[in-house]
Amino acid sequence: MKKVILSLLAIFTLASGFSWNNYGHQVVVKLAERHLTERAKENIRKYFDYDLAKEASWMDRHCNDKEILCTKSWHTFVADQKSHYYDPGYRLEPGDALRGILMADWNLSHYKTLTDSAVMMNIRMVIHFLGDMHCPSHCYFGPKTHYKVRIKEKDYKSFHALYDMMGTILHKERKGENIDQCVEALDTAKKSEIKKIQKGSVYDWAKDCADRIAVIFEWNPYGTYQLKDDTIERGEKMTDTQLQYAGYRLAKLLNNYFDK
């Protein structure tokens, strides 16, 4: 019994550190799937003959596996505090989300030359790290955000964990939406708007994310314990935009690779 309890605690601890939580990551992938071409879907099914969203958090679940331990630091990225441009120097040696995306992007652009297992691994990387890049707590402008916070009378494990959970709080806990319902609510952009969202490079997307995410530190500066009472309500539009943009941009990348 003691071992079971410890195992459950370990699972909970790991899950609580997931960017977007599994709920948000699956939302991103399912939203992207709605915008894949039939050819792209068919080619992806050669590697995953089930719902691709099941792979959305694979990189989190396996981040401590010896074979991919080098990717453990790839879930976040750093942006310059003033310009909001991506700053590769801070994590040049260990790597970050952008480097993970770009590595997978290059590999999947040549996926027909890869083994099936390599294609699967790189799909897992791109669907997960693209979601990570859009998660508010995974863009660092300076100090890390792993400090305990409170909203009204409720404590949260950390500022980081609060924004990891934001999609889940807003859609699952407050609105009672399952993943499909959340995707339906978010997938509202017109084709012309989607093309605009998808325009640019991964670096452009990182800058766009940082521009939008920076507002959370204007509301509650680094190190603030007692957050403003309306912090979650204020974050709704930004959170939904980040989830939506991540889904549309992921669709573009997957179509680029597999609509051939």
Image (cartoon, rainbow, N blue to C red):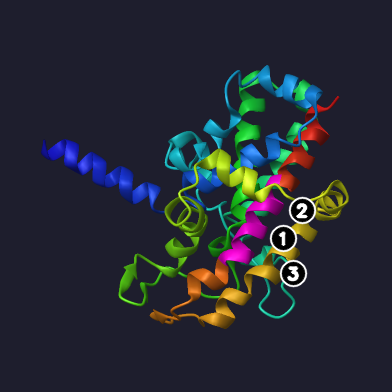
Residue 213 vertical placement versus 47 (above, below): below
Identify the element where label 2 is drawn. Answer: helix
Residue 72 vertical placement versus 219 (above, below): above
- Sequence-wise, the earlier of marks 1 and 3 is 3
Decide: marks 3, 2 in contact (CB < 8 A)? no
**x, y (%) of residue 69?**
48, 42
Residue 110 vertical placement versus 243 (above, below): above
Residue hosting label 1: 206
Mark 1 nearby-residue class (10 Å; few <14, some 14–19, many ≥20): many
- Dominant SS type (magenta): helix
The quadrant in which the N terminus is found is top left
Magenta-drawn segment: 236-247
Mark 3 nearby-residue class (10 Å; few <14, some 14–19, many ≥20): some
Residue type at mark 1 is Ala
**x, y (%) of residue 91?**
60, 61
Residue type at mark 3 is Tyr
Disc count in the image? 3
Q: What residue is at 56 percent from the left and 68 percent from the top?
A: 235
Q: Is residue 99 at all visible to an observer of this figure?
A: no
Residue that lies at the very extreme toward the front in this rendered image: 175
Decide: marks 1, 3 in contact (CB < 8 A)? yes
Decide: marks 2, 1 in contact (CB < 8 A)? yes
Residue type at mark 2 is Val
- Is residue 22 found left or right of 200 in the rendered image? left
Residue hosting label 3: 85
Identify the element where label 1 is drawn. Answer: helix
Q: What residue is at 25 percent from the left and 46 percent from the top?
A: 9
- Is residue 101 found left or right of 223 in the rendered image? right
The quadrant in which the C terminus is found is top right
* Disc 3 to disc 2, C-alpha distance: 11 Å
User: Disc number at residue 202?
Assistant: 2
